[in-house]
Each structure stands twice: as structure tokens, then as C-alpha cells.
Amino acid sequence: MTFLNTLINASYYVLSAAVSLILIRNIVKTRDAQEAVLYCIILMPFLLRVFHIK
Amino acid sequence: MNNRSLFIVKIVAFTLMLVAIVWAGIEFYNHRNFTETVVLGDGVSTVKKLSDYYPGLKDSVNDCNIYIFEGKEPGGTLMVIGGSHPEEPAANLTAELLVETAEVEVGRLIVAIRANRSASTVTRPGDAYPLYYTIPTPWGEKQYRMGDRWTNPLDAWPDPEVYVHYPSKQMLAYMDIRNFNRTWPGYANGTLTERTNFAFMELVRAENVDVFIDLHEAELEYPVISTIVAHQKGTNVAAMTSMMLNATEFKIGMEYSPKSLHGLSHREVGDHSQAVSYLLETPEPLLDRVRGITDEHLLLTGKDPFVQKAGEYGLLYEKIDDDGWPIDVRVGRHASTVLELAQSWSDLNPDRSIRVSNVPRYAEVIENGIGFYFANPANVPSQRLAYE
């Protein structure tokens, strides 16, 4: 049980990091300014999670 | 929009995002790592760690301090825990009041101030909770972490779809797998919260605790309020305590712990150990869903016009007026109830008597304020300080 929890916990952090990278890539690639701002806002909770801050 | 303008918008948005993250991140980090200083009163004999009873918690965020008071004469053992739900500050403040003032004449007293320490390292920004609160003392202000009901997701994440309680297999709300008062009696191979409960159960069994008291606060919209919830083993003591307090200090009820509702301390500690378990509730308007501005002022004064209006319409289970429910009143209620439970227990169990002295009661706490009883850490030798 503890091992599974640790594994799932770690994989969620990996997922958060992956989503963060995709969002950063989208910020760079998008041609729409509104989308770029939106991606920046969405990125915040993912980065706080990845850095174990919130 | 041309490429140059788009580039500028992206740079500005990204920079603003980074500023927001750093700003908020520093606040969150400082709150998570904020330490509260506790001055050990003359009655404290030893300070142990929870991991002394279950090494599986060693060096974890929930390896909290366990304060032990040895009495001058042998007798029974009383255990009091605060901080099960760190959004209920009267609980940890009462536990700290005991640590700083209590002296034990007969028996032993064991206190935990921050039973679920992890839950005190996070708040609910979505509900506009303040990060800290301060208690005025004769030597300045003493600051505390405001916490949440649940273990910090940074320490236990993600939650299951459905939380299956151990060992009853009762299905509970998913997030309550991080609720310290839904995971009793704990599970050695479980999540951080379940392991913390398991460690406390090991402590209760190892120290042969007779009376176990879990301190809480409740919203006025909730029917279990201003009451002692008692395991069936201890209803006589709770009833006598309720009668005595109603006759001498304030109104307080007494309720039976439901046998089929699992995970709560008043049920599981009594079921899985020799101890008689009780849970105390005082009113805390900050927890009410109908409240207005949610800030430190509301937390400490318990004054809210919206909760008061709900009371005028008869929607609450406890009265509220212009005086609100100040923190001193709430701590005073807990202090008197703990002392009266110990007294009633001793009257009915003279061979396992517990006598605690020097702790201020309801009227004294209201008159002087809770901060009056907290000593200045600057005037105390470092070996008489503990950190939460």
C-alpha cells in the first residue's frame, strides 16, 4: 500500500512536470496573444506543484 | 498582431507569471516552514517524539512532540491532543496552555499540541483563510500557523476515488483519507495520516492511557457543537462533567459516540485500546459556510454579521450575539472541560485518579486572555523550549 502510494505520488509529479513542459512549449509556439496569456495562468499551479511549494 | 508585438506580450505574460509564482511561493514556503516556540512549563518532565512509539514516522513532517508530565503520586493517565484539525485554533492553543501551565499532583498527563502537523502547514486560499494568527501576550505578540482540516497534499497525494476506512471497510469521502479524525485507529502500512493515527494508538497502548481527549471546534451550522462526544465506556464521566459545568461555568452538552460511524477518535480510540475516549467541540464561526469576510479578526473574535443573521433566522445549533465567540472563551471552555473530565474520572475511579493543577479555568482565561499564560521564550533557557 505504502509502495503503491509512493509510486502514484511520484508519477503524478512526473505528469505535472510533463504538462508544465507542454504548456511552456505551447506558449512559445502559439500565434495568439490571448492563448499565450491563458497558458501562463494555467502554468502557475503546475509549477508550484512540481517545486513542492503548493 | 505582428511577431514583435506577440513576442512582447509573451515575455510580459511569462514574467508576470514568474513574479506571481515567486511571490506566492515565498509566502507558501515560509508558512510551511514556520516554527512555533513552546515554553515548557515546570510540570513537563520529558518531551518525546511520536516516532518513539512508531519508528515508521521518524523524521517525517508528522513526527510531533509528545509532552509528558509525571505526577508526584502514581495514578491514572490523561492524554490530550490538539491540532487534529489545525483550522480549529482553540484546540492547539488549549494544548499549549496545558504544556505551559499544568502541574500534575496525581497520575500522569500526556499532551500533543500539533497532532497532525502536516495539516498545519497548509491553509485554504480558495476559502480566503489567513496564513497566520497572532495572540497578544504581556511581552508582545505570539504568532501561529493557521492550518487546514486535511493533511497537506504535498505530504499525501493523490486521494483515492473512495476512501475505504481501515479496519471497518466503511466507505467515506475521498478527501477524508487525509482527515486525521476519519483515519483512527490508523494503519501501519497506510498513508501518512493513517500512520500518524497508528502511532498515536501505539502511544495510547504503550503509556496505558486511561482518558483520551481530542480537542476540536465546530461551525454553528453543525449540530455537534458545545458538547462532549463520549465513547460508551465513558458516558458516566461525561454526563457528570456536563452537569457540573452547566451548574457552575457554562452550558455544554453530552452525546454518545455513534457505534456505526468509523474513523473518529471518540469511537476508535475507545474501541481499539483500554482508554476511554472523548471529543470536545466549541463554536468557531470562521468555519460556518455563511460567514462574511474570512480573516484573522473573525478567527480570533468569532464575530460575523452573516452568521449572526443566520442565528436570528434559527438556522444555527448554537447561539451567537454581538459578543461573538472570542478565542479566549473557546479556549476557556476547553480548559475547564478537560479539568472537569479529569476530576469526574477521578471521582469515579479513585484507584486511577488524575489530579492536574495550576491550569486556568474558563473565567480566568476570559479575564486575562490566553496570551497572559504564555511565557516569553527569550527569558527561558533553550533546554526549556520546544518547537512545533
Image (spheres, rainbow, N blue to C red):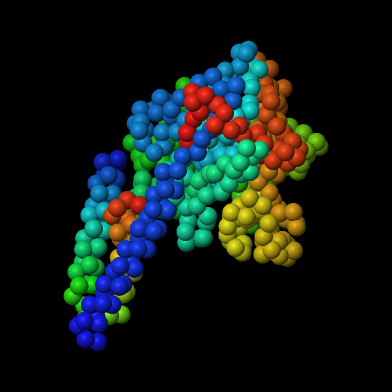
Question: In the image, A9: left or right of B245?
Answer: left
Q: Quadrant of residue B190?
A: top left
Horizontal side of residue B209 vs A37, given as left or right: right
Residue located farthest toward the right when viewing the structure as drawn: B247
Residue at the location (69% across, 41% down)?
A: B369
Q: Is residue B249 above or below residue B209?
A: below
Residue depicted at x 59% and y 54%: B296
Residue B147 rendering spot, x and y as whole percentages: 50, 48
How far from the left and from the top, in percent, is residue B94? 61, 37
Q: Of residues A24 and B225, which is closer to you in this image? A: A24
- Is A21 positioned to the left or the right of B255 in the image? left
Q: Residue at x 81, y 37 (%)?
A: B247
Taking the image as drawn, is residue B134 in sight?
A: yes
Residue B258 at least partly seen: no
| Vertical comparison of B1 with B30: above or below | below
Q: Residue at x 33, y 57 (%)?
A: A48
Instruction: List x then y, in percent, for residue B30.
Output: 42, 48
Considering depth in this image, is B208 or A54 the residue closer to the camera? Answer: A54
Which of the image's four quarters has the N terminus of chain B? bottom left
Q: Residue furthest top?
A: B73
